[in-house]
Image: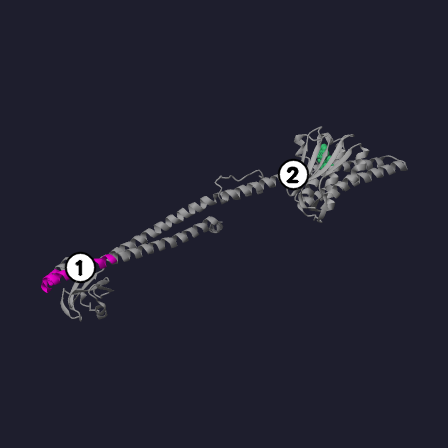
Amino acid sequence: MFLEKINRFRRSLAFRLTILYVGIFTILIFAAFYVFYQAMISRINARTDNEMEVEMKECSLILAAKGTEALNGHIEEEVKSSGIDDRFFRLLTMGGEEILSSDPGSWKELGVNRSVLKKLTKSSPEFETIKLSKLKYQVRVIYGVVDSGKVLQIGHSLVDDEHVFQDLRVLFRTLIPVFLFLASFGGWFMAKRSLASVEQITQTAIAIADGAIEKRVPTTGRGDEVDRLSGVFNNMLERIQSLIVEMKEVTDNIAHDLRSPITRIRGLAEVTLLSEKNMEEYQSMAESTVEECDRLLWMINMMLEISETEAGVSTLSLSEVSLSDLIEEACDLYLPLAEERDIQIKTSISTQYHLSGDKGKLQRVLANLLDNAIKYTMPGGKIIVSSQKVDKTVMLSVHDTGIGISPDETSRIFERFYRADKSRSVPGAGLGLSLVQAIVRSHGGEIKVSSAPGAGSTFTVFLPLAKIL
Ligand code: ADP
């Protein structure tokens, strides 16, 4: 249990982010300290060299003005004040022979570097850093031409510089763990804070999996990545919830609408079984059963077709379809039915438009719209089928002077099985417009309705245009 907790912690994104953050921080802090340390070394070395050069110039002036004796006196005083292990002076000939020197003490080992002597010019002194076995720290040695034919060698212990460097190293060694501790703490805190919203999404997903479909992730409104993810997640939940509600409605409707024909079929069969009938009655009952079965089959097929068209499962057999031919053919087909009901059908097609679409399916769109227009228009009414171009879209509209639809019902008529109150006396299943919408959408188009009770309805289909002839 405890081991599992540790493993989960090690696999967590917050832990990995903290490790990454601390790793990057460590590299950066070491690099920063290294650069700072090197800068300090070169600065302190430059200062030491500068001091030695000043000392060299002072000795040179004393030698030039007051001679060797005076220089010797000055040197002894300098060694006395700085310490015998700290300073060493030696006056040499250009060939490297000693003329005078301070007390050698621990400096005995210090020789004369002849190659340095050879490079020496009057204007620029030469430096070298060496280690003497009797002195704990390195020494810096300067060679300079002080008087015609004379060279002064000054040795300077780097003990003070080395102490500064040591202090710096101790400071770094103390500060780095403190910084690393603070960085780990800060990194962990920041990682946890920025991942808190992700944790909330996880918790919401867990709650939803347990059945709380109405749960949503709180958004901060900051517009950062996690906030956007929360927004997308909530939208997705919204969509899923509405799909579930839709599915429930559809199943309820299916159950309700299939129950009626099945009950009727059962009723017919029961009546047939219970009482003796003559042949004609049996025949009429069989006919009614076949009719009900056909209606059931039609409904089932229609629902399948709508689902397949919506899901894009049924493929479109695309070809170039002439809109005027489509309209004329459909109107010719429905003219006898319209005449029978004393309804006029008029067309208004100004130009020839071509669509890229599935002719059979587009015919079903127009047939359904015309069928509805005839069904829901009183005798003496009028239907106008027209087409026109709007930008890159073809607008096909079917207008009727029928019963119309109330505003609160217009938004629902494309739902499966929905039927407006006023039309319930007319036969229908409430599936035609669902199929029309699915077909139009599968062609990349849209369908709209404008209607008012008693003032008729206009169904307008917008479809992408193939080309104008
Ligand atoms: P059905 O016509 O079989 O009931 P539809 O899906 O074709 O099913 O239409 C759904 C509902 O929309 C209809 O029941 C009717 O209430 C309404 N409707 C459709 N077309 C018209 C129209 N032209 N005029 C008035 N109401 C209409």
Asked whether disc 1 touches disc 2, contact meaning CB atoms under 8 Å apart, the reply is: no
Q: Which residues are magenta?
A: 46-75
Q: Is mark 2 within 8 Å of ligand 1?
A: no
Q: Helix, strand or loop at disc 1? A: helix
**C-alpha distance separating marks 1 and 2:** 97 Å
The percent position of residue 72, horizontal first and vertical second, equals 11, 63
Residue tagged by mark 2?
A: 246
Q: State left or right for residue 464 relative to residue 334.
A: left
Q: Residue at x 82, y 34 (%)?
A: 340
Q: Residue at x 70, y 32 (%)?
A: 457
- Tell me the number on the disc at residue 55: 1
* Picture coordinates of residue 199, whole percent (x, y): 50, 44
Asked whether 117 falls inside the magenta stretch, the response is no
Q: Is residue 336 left or right of residue 207?
A: right
In the rendered structure, which disc, 1 or 2, sits on the residue that comes first in sequence?
A: 1
Q: Nearer the viewer, mark 1 or mark 2?
A: 1
The answer to which image quadrant residue 118 occupies is bottom left
Q: Residue furthest top?
A: 454
